[in-house]
Amino acid sequence: MSAQPVAGPDPDRVLHHFDYRGPEAGAHLHESLALLRDRCPVAHSDQHGGYWIVTRHADVVAVAQDWEAFSSQLGVSIPANPNVALAIPEHIDPPLHREYKRLVNRWFTPAAVAPLAEGAQRIASELVDGFAGAGEADVMADFAVPFPGLVFFELVLGAPADEVAHVTQTAAGATDPGNPASRDCYVELNGWIRQLTDRRRAEGRREVRDVVDAVLAAEIEGRPIRDDEVQGLILLLILGGLDTTAGVIGQSVLRFCAQPEIPAQLREQPDLVPAAVEELLRLDTSFPGIGRTVRHDTELTGQPMAAGDKVYVSWAAANRDPAEFDEPEEFRIDRASNRHLAFGAGPHRCAGSNLARLNLRVAIGEIVSRLADLRLAVPADRIEYHAAFNRRPLHVPITFTAAASSDR
């Protein structure tokens, strides 16, 4: 469950050969990004055909907001990958992007997701019930990975009860780059989406509408939505919030093991959990960055960029920029201003951020209230991470004392 420790970042390699999918983006992501941000905030790497790396908060926000110069539609993959399935609206630029975004936004407002809290709490409690008596667990396999999928498929998409567990496992397998069957899982997930939408069309509009009804009934640019657009929208809704939410939960537990005063405070003052979630999102975002393609010759803070250049926009680096955050490496639950970019920025900011926040508040609350004396069962430097556009620990083996029984 653990690997040999990875040597610390080499400054020369980081400054000239940074690989967002390499070891410096796994075990030593934040040290590597700090080197880039401090010494060369708009750096260039020769990896993957060459790409720019933007690390300062102000520059990251500027790129994210300027879709005319830094396009998603021209490609977010580094290097370019024509085989990537169309994820709507992530791979679409304004103005068309706005039509898709408006279509889903109303279903993920704070008011829209609030009624899901009771169901999410039930799911979280049932998962913890499954291992609380053992005194040990792998947080990722036993809780963090299944939790957001179970919430989404059951409570948001209204999947049939006898399909929820299997499709949750399939989606988790599709997003796991270390899974040799990930491609098969991806194909199966797409097939399940088609079955879901075919079934919902046959059933007709429900008395109480949900996001699937809204997508199926949508008009885009004055015409009925196409099947491939339905597929792309629902696929992104599913994949956008599973691995990322799991990653924050896993990294939060790692932080709790290293800083036991944090869960102790939250156990005594549960009203502080929402503020803690925001600080955990800032420090330990599992959406570390995204790619953009330069649409036309431009420059950023004096650095020329040519049309067609690839740009890696680092949310994780921006979230620890001392120009934006006092004591950026410290967990401060009383932080007065927390303009973190864990959900991105600009027109492509994550539509599901309110659902993610709800899931994280429930998950963190359940963990700190049910599991005391959290200890990591392996040395921290043996923890492996996915390294790419999503970052999450592969395994987080812990021991603990059950703090309370679940009778909710």
Image (tube, rainbow, N blue to C red):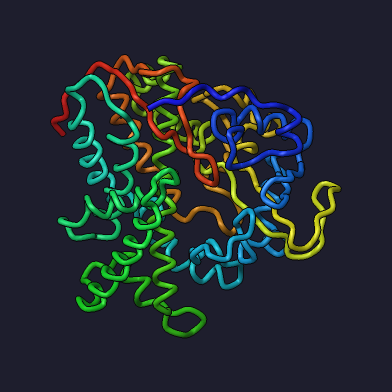
Most foreground residue, 351 or 385? 385
x and y percent of residue 306 in the render?
80, 59
Q: Quadrant of the C terminus?
A: top left
Quarter where residue 228 is shown = bottom left
Q: Residue at x 55, y 68 (%)?
A: 97
Q: Is residue 87 shown left or right of residue 112? A: right
Residue 101 visible in the shown view:
no
Q: Position of residue 245 (x, y in %)?
A: 41, 42
Q: Residue at x 63, y 32 (%)?
A: 320
The residue closer to the viewer here, 372 or 149, is: 149
The image shows residue 233, relative to residue 351, as above or below, that is below
Q: Position of residue 399 (x, y in %)?
A: 30, 18
Q: Is residue 147 visible?
A: yes
Where residue 64 sits in the image (x, y, percent)? 65, 53
In this picture, residue 267 sits left or right of residue 103: left
Question: Where is residue 8, by image quadrant?
Answer: top right
| Residue drawn where x is 60% and y is 24% of the image | 329
Task: Determine whether 264 is above or below 391 in the image.
Answer: above
- Say which quadrant the N terminus sits in: top left
Q: Report the residue that reaches farthest toward the bottom.
A: 223
Residue positioned 51% across, 33% down in the render: 284
Figure disc tally:
0
Give the side of residue 210 with respect to residue 395, left or right: left
| Up/down of 169 relative to 405, above or below | below
